[in-house]
Image (cartoon, rainbow, N blue to C red):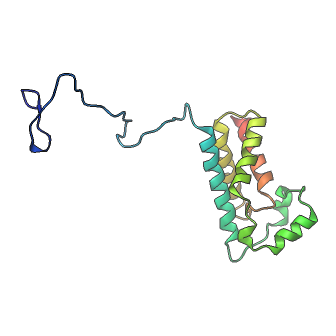
């Protein structure tokens, strides 16, 4: 604006009326990203979906591995014992990429355990940290698959709730 209150944007002079105030957009510290939540008030549903997407990506990565190695016997402790032999045979007949559970199923399981055990919001991220640490501690020999993802996820959630 010049000294007479006229806008000089774009090289044109326009009169600015007293009652016209420029609208200011709310900005955060970066000036470009607008967030509706913060870590102090995080969106737990969105965070759970992100964690479940990462877990499912681990399962898809294993399913698409051409070697498709079996889990070593010493890591079979994570196998889901509630899977019937019939279901196990049916899954074995499916191509590996079809053995990965649906995203809704992974999120549903996570949300159910999270809500029923009344976990703190920090436990969501810590669960993923513990799953990643478990994979790293086994030097990649433990794969998250259709027959062990629930016990692995449940164990990591319990660990996260105990620490936090």
Residue closer to the observer: 111 or 2 = 2
Which residue is situated farthest in the left direction here? Answer: 3
Q: Quadrant of the N terminus?
A: top left
Judged left or right of residue 115, residue 21 is: left
Counting from the top left corner in percent of width and height, residue 71 is at 79, 66
Counting from the top left corner in percent of width and height, residue 99 is at 76, 66
**Residue plotted at (40% across, 42% down):** 33
Judged left or right of residue 25, residue 143 is: right
**145 w.r.t. 51: above or below:** below
Which residue is situated farthest in the right direction here? Answer: 85
**Residue plotted at (9% across, 44% down):** 11
**Residue plotted at (82% across, 74% down):** 93
Judged left or right of residue 162, residue 42 is: left
**28 w.r.t. 145: above or below:** above
Which residue is situated farthest in the top direction here? Answer: 18
Counting from the top left corner in percent of width and height, residue 44 is at 62, 38
The image quadrant that residue 121 belongs to is: top right
The image quadrant that residue 77 belongs to is: bottom right
**Residue plotted at (63% across, 54% down):** 53
**118 w.r.t. 33: above or below:** above
Residue closer to the observer: 16 or 122 = 16
Label tally: 0
**85 w.r.t. 2: above or below:** below
Q: Quadrant of the C terminus?
A: top right
Counting from the top left corner in percent of width and height, residue 83 is at 89, 59
């Amino acid at each position: 604006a010049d000294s007479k209150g006229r806008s000089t944007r774009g090289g044109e002079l326009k009169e600015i009326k007293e009652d016209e105030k420029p609208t200011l957009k709310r900005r955060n510290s970066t000036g470009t990203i607008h967030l509706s939540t913060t870590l102090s008030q995080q969106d737990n549903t969105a965070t759970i979906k992100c964690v479940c997407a990462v877990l499912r990506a681990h399962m898809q990565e294993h399913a698409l591995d051409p070697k498709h190695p079996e889990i070593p016997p010493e890591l079979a402790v994570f196998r889901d014992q509630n899977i019937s032999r019939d279901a196990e045979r049916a899954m074995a007949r499916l191509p590996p990429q079809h053995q990965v559970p649906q995203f809704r199923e992974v999120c549903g399981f996570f949300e159910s355990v999270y809500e029923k055990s009344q976990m703190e919001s920090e436990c969501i991220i810590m669960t993923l940290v513990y799953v990643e640490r478990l994979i790293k501690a086994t030097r990649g020999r433990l794969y998250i698959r259709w027959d062990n993802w629930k016990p692995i996820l449940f164990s990591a959630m319990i660990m996260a709730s105990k620490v936090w």
